[in-house]
Amino acid sequence: MARYILRRLLQAIPTLLGISIISFILVNAAPGDPVTMRTFGDPRMTEETRQTLRRQLGLDQPLAVQYFTWLTGLAVRSGDQVAMMTSPTNTCAYFGGVNLTVCNTGGGVLRGDLGTSLDTKQPVWKRLVERMPATLELGIASLLLALVIGVPAGVLAAVYRGTWFDGVVRIITVIFTSVPIFWMALLLILVFAVILGWLPTGGRQTVSLTQEFNLGDRLRHLIMPAFVLALGGIAGFSRLMRTETLEVLNMDFVRTARAKGLPNGQVWFVHAFRNALIPMMTVLGPAIVGVLGGAVVVETIFAWPGMGRLTVSAAFQQDYPLVLGAGMFFAVLTILGNLLSDIFYGLVDPRVRLG
Amino acid sequence: MTTSATTQVGKAAVAPSEMTKALARPSRSFWQDAWLRLLHNKAAVAGAIVILFFMLVAVFAPVLAPHNPLELNSGKGFLPPMWVEQSATGKAGTPEFILGTDNLGRDVLSRLIYGARVSMVVGFIPTLIIIVVGVSLGLVAGYWGGSTDNILMRITDVVYAFPDLLFFIIVMTALRATAIGQFLNGLFLLFVALALVNWVGVARLVRGQVLALKERDFVLASRAVGSTHMRIMFRHILPNSMGVIIVAMAFLIPGAIITEAILGYLGLGLRPSTDPADIFITSWGSMLLEGQSAINNQPWLLLAPAIAVALVVLSFNFLGDGLRDALDPRLRE
């Protein structure tokens, strides 16, 4: 098992490298440069200072060199440029043999530094971590919601197979899987926030001077985005639970339990449900991955201050280091989620051999 | 459908007279059989009709639209749909503008009709590219294996580890101002982005099919009589994978339409056109964006494109489900 996990983690390295190269090229393919964009119309800025700024940020270098610097934190320039490149944060050395100046900027993705956001001049890592609690809150709430609604719905649909209840669950499942989540988000906002006025249209809490923590207010803000994000999970979990419960209900131990005269509720939820729950572990991984991807949409529509929304706005503002950092962060989480689900699969079902 | 099929089989097993009757039926090919199964699925047929309707609307938009979708009817902005007697702004709907007008006084119905063009084109064209590329690479990777296969699987890993929407947003923001980004009002870039993300899934699917099929006896037999690799791939393996490919296609199309709508809603889709000679004037995604800004007083501006998107997407999903049941009876629930 340990060897399998190690191998999967090693396999993730080329994947992450591939992602980083593709996103780096894409992000840098945008016309116009970030320096001009951010200093446009500033009278104190001369073309000369802009040029210096570009040089400091390494933006005047070829793309491959920029990528290398971003990855390793080592800035490379041809010729002896030690005097020009040295700064409080850089230590430089000139290698005469290859005619290259190499500076250690102290950062680099490989050393866990995702760079500095162009907009706020804060470390990318810090900006992401700041937003993480909001995304976690939303993600966990939606997973819980999906479990709490999806699992009982699936079990009951199996128990009452062929009745109106089963039919209703089936139709809702189809609707939840085929209606786009952003569509459902807009519709819910329209109905519950605009027409009925019961819930706020977006945000994580009501804006006030003190920003005190108010649980009721927080929940009112949380419910719509969490529900929208849970749609796919509700459908997936209930469908899986229905199939699994149907299978378990036909097994001997369930008949025995019933023959002993146990009440229906106990048979369904203690005997059948517990055994049907095992395969659920395997879909949790993909569910987590789905929530991550969905968070990008849901956070944007509901103005939820999480990592997804941060990334989208960074893309709009061409804050390259932030977009790249966030992209890598999402990719790592997705890979871990998939790995987790494969491991669960192997633990739950011994027929699946990992290795 | 499942139950009726099983009871037929069950009856045939117990009653020999019925079994001979069943055997006496004219033999049907797999495709005829699938077609009949599809026709029996009411939801799928309804979906197909709705899709056909929207395709016709897209093609004949200039004939069907009651107004010029770009015409600014001054003084007639924010009119509610014709059946609303008084909206939040105190205006009454008129039969002249069936679904009302937007903030600039443009006819919502006409814009909706023209918007169908974008959704249909975005649904079909990238899907065709995806299928052609995905199927050929999947066939090659699955059949030959080796390094082609390895490279394909590594690319798959990369694409799967990145949230799709994030990729679309990065592509659209980064390349929007370039020549590619402006071609066809930005639609071309959207096609490319959609194709880049989705071909991988199809390639992987086809690869799996090929891996399973190439060990089967009929392939072995064909090889034994000296068929070329090309013949085995295109004459034996591809036709047998066709069902899976068609089903994948039916689900790719609504996915592409949803993506366009989300990107349009984020302001990254089709560039709004002001030239009446353009084929693509507005999209449902852009209309959603315009609608959301007026959500408090003019909810119909949001509802009209929202209902259109949902209708088309649901129809494709129903058709896709029907095709899956018809083409691969084993996959039925």
Image: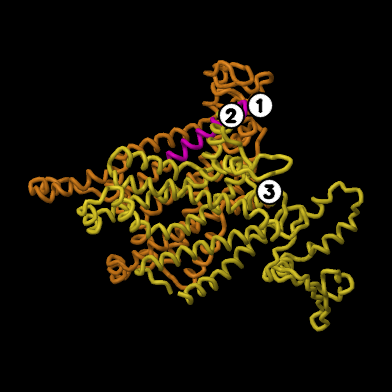
- The magenta stretch is B296-315
Horizontally, residue B297 falls left or right of residue A285, namely right
Please report whichever mark, 1 or 2, sits nearer to the chain's N-terminal start: 1
Pointer 1 and pointer 2 on the same chain = yes
Residue at the spot of label 1: B103
**Chain identity for the colour orange used in the image:** B
Residue at the spot of label 2: B301
Distance between the alpha carbons at the discs numbered 2 and 3: 25 Å
Image location (x, y in percent) of residue A118: 76, 56
Q: Colour of chain A?
A: yellow
Label of residue A342 in the image: none
Distance between the alpha carbons at the discs numbered 1 and 2: 9 Å
Image location (x, y in percent) of residue A225: 56, 43
In this view of the protein, which residue sits in the foreground, B91 or A79?
B91
B220 in relation to A245, above or below: below
Q: Quadrant of residue B209?
A: bottom left
Give me the chain letter of mark 2: B
Q: How is the image coloured?
A: by chain
Residue A30 is a magenta residue: no
